[in-house]
Amino acid sequence: MRNVYVYVLDTMADWELGHVSSELHSGRFFKRDAQGVSLQTVGIAREPIHTMGGLTVLPDCLVEDIAPVETSVLLLPGAETWSDPRHSAILEKAGELLSAGATVCAICGATAALAGCGLLDDRPHTSNGAGFLEMVCPRYRGQDFYVDAPSVADGSLITAGSTGSLLWAKQIIARLEVFEASTLEAWYEYFRTGRPESFFALMESLPSARGDRPQP
């Protein structure tokens, strides 16, 4: 079982997590021998948070419950409250996870939070456009490693700008190796383009369509 932790904080941009959280939680397109995934929300306290979309989320666990082991995955969504010093605990944990070879995935405002503690200084990454990190984070020193792309995967670090959530989800799913390659590509093309042929390619790539899903 692989633990995927979703950090939740007030003003969280809930839509940025939609593609990746729904696929990892439901497992609806997982390949036959995919490793199981446990998706848990994590907070700085066991108090409910309120997303930018007006949803209330009660964390499943606390930051200190995250195991800094290679199989752990941490998802950091964008939010307008990342500058709150209370989030230093999760940023410290992100550094521990990266040092352990675990996967850390940040999008939008969360990339600025990582930049602020030096975690983007020497690894390829992206954010909300060239110049954004310098504007919001005076301590940022990773300009030579910035990549102008919607989402960038550098091994265990996956970063994205505010409009890159779909590609970010694809790269996270690829990192976890829970989809067949053909399923992942068809999934991405369908949600990127809406073309019916991509939908049918997605359906045909699943074990049930190939006749190799184990019988009950």
Image (spheres, rainbow, N blue to C red):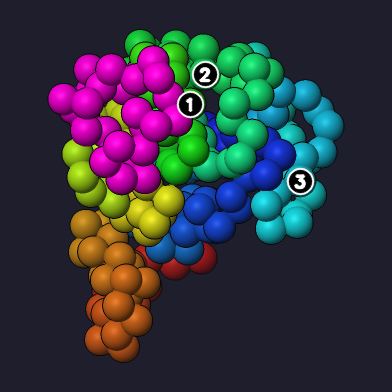
Looking at the image, residue 67 sits to the left or right of residue 157; the answer is right
Q: Secondary structure at mark 1?
A: helix
Point 76% across, 46% down: residue: 50
Residue 179 place in picture, x, y as percent = 32, 55
N-term-proximal mark, 1 vs 3: 3
Asked whether 67 falls inside the magenta stretch, the response is no
Looking at the image, residue 166 sits to the left or right of residue 59; the answer is left
N-term-proximal mark, 3 vs 2: 3
Task: State the extent of the magenta-drawn residues as a range.
Answer: 119-146
- Residue underneath mark 2: 91
47 versus 197 height, above or below: above
Give how far apart the Cα atoms at labels 3 and 2 are: 20 Å
Residue 17 place in picture, x, y as percent = 52, 51
Please state which of the two labelled residues, at mark 1 or mark 2, is closer to the viewer.
Answer: 1
Residue 136 place in picture, x, y as percent = 45, 30
- Residue underneath mark 1: 113
Q: Secondary structure at mark 3?
A: strand
Residue 66 makes an appearance in the image? no
